[in-house]
Image (tube, rainbow, N blue to C red):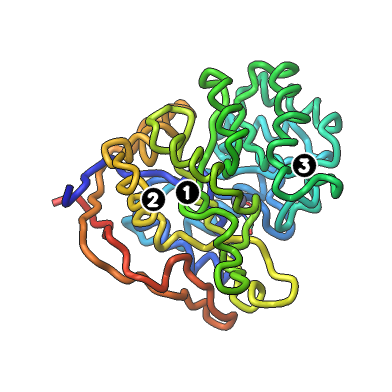
Amino acid sequence: MEELVFTRPDDWHLHLRDGALLEAVLPHTAAWFGRAVVMPNLKPPVSDTDRARAYRDEIRALLPADSRFEPLMAAYLTEDGDPADIVAGHREGVIFGVKYYPAHATTHSAAGVRAIENVYRHLEAFEEAQVPVLFHGEVTDPDIDIFDREAVFIERILEPLRARFPGLKVVLEHLTTRDGVEFVKSQHGAVGATITCHHLMYDRNAMFQGGLRPHLYCLPILKARPHTEALRAAATSGLGMFFLGTDSAPHLKHTKETDCGCAGVFNAPVALSTYAEVFEEEGALDRFEAFASLNGPRFYGLRPNSDRIRLRRAETTPPSQVNVPGEGQIVVFEGDRAHRWVPESASP
Ligand code: NCD
Ligand code: ZN
């Protein structure tokens, strides 16, 4: 196949940050994706309708006048947040979904949930109003090995939650394990999951290949090879509950190349080419559109984007870094090699 023309894709899990970082990274997503679910882990967190509206305005103000990119705002679930405010924001179309961070699970998650019982009243309201809840699915118990945190979260939190709130719309974000794949499949379409391009490409050995690789350090952490294989099979299966979410998470280079570096992979500039390479390797380019452009909207009850883009087979070299004026650089995932697919506009 020399080119792939398909429905414009969406990114169902994205970190855009704010201020100068936002300005530097936004064009890389807005150029190719129709919509993106924008994560709320700013400082302070985007935890209510007013903040979500203000953040959406900040993003929209940076888009070119002819851009059709639509930021979909996730609200940060806090134990003392007001569920009625979130439900009202959702009805109004400001809040797309709620992001559940276990407290201290990842970057800027200190305001997250300490115990799920503390947000039962919120989840009840979200179930009733059909507000999707997007889970960072990792336990934070220091006794649980970092490679097991997703599997234990499913067992301890998600399985009981599905029984208690059977009508709640649940997405397990940035899926990383075979356990996760099996759980999602077993829920008969009621639970969705996003999968990143870096978790499809690499297993945990890559973090230590020839030395320590801070730019491959993210959360949930890369897992052992059999998990990577299970994710590749799930993403390329065509099954409707698996969809594209890059978890592109920009951090300035000096905050990753240090003795206690931040978690996050910045993949927005290469997201489409890296996903396409994985699908090509799996002989599944014919299922790429389902994963990238159709499954997500169907799960969320939205229409797919109405226009199309093209991926053309041609060797191309992405930027290796993105400059943030006055702040530094962000290292681009896979930015140091040639890529096989170039995205292009498919309109005449
Ligand atoms: C994300 C970030 O930097 O905001 N980091 C990451 O490693 N994925 C947070 C997150 O999604 O866990
Ligand atoms: Zn994320």
Asked if the residue at tag 1 contacts the one at tag 3, i.e. Cβ–Cβ closer than 8 Å, the answer is no
Residue that appears at 48% across and 29% down? 241
Which one is nearer the viewer's eye here, 228 or 198? 228
Asked if the residue at tag 2 contacts the one at tag 1, i.e. Cβ–Cβ closer than 8 Å, the answer is yes
Instruction: Tell whether 297 sits left or right of 287.
Output: right
Ligand 1 shown in quarter: bottom right
Estimate how packed mark 1 is, as few (under 14), some (14 to 19) or many (20 or more) residues with alpha carbons within 10 Å.
many
Label of residue 139 in the image:
3
Q: Secondary structure at mark 2?
A: helix
Which one is nearer the viewer's eye here, 341 or 122? 341
Asked if the residue at tag 3 contacts the one at tag 2, i.e. Cβ–Cβ closer than 8 Å, the answer is no
**Sequence-first tag of 1 and 2:** 1
Quarter of image, res 208: bottom right
Instruction: Tell whether 1 sits left or right of 181.
Output: left
Instruction: Tell whether 60 sits left or right of 222.
Output: left
**Sequence-first tag of 2 and 3:** 3
Estimate how packed mark 3 is, as few (under 14), some (14 to 19) or many (20 or more) residues with alpha carbons within 10 Å.
many
**Residue holding disc 2:** 275
Residue that appears at 55% across and 32% down? 181
Check the image and report above or below for 338 versus 59. Answer: below
Estimate how packed mark 2 is, as few (under 14), some (14 to 19) or many (20 or more) residues with alpha carbons within 10 Å.
many
Q: Nearer the viewer, mark 3 or mark 1?
A: 1
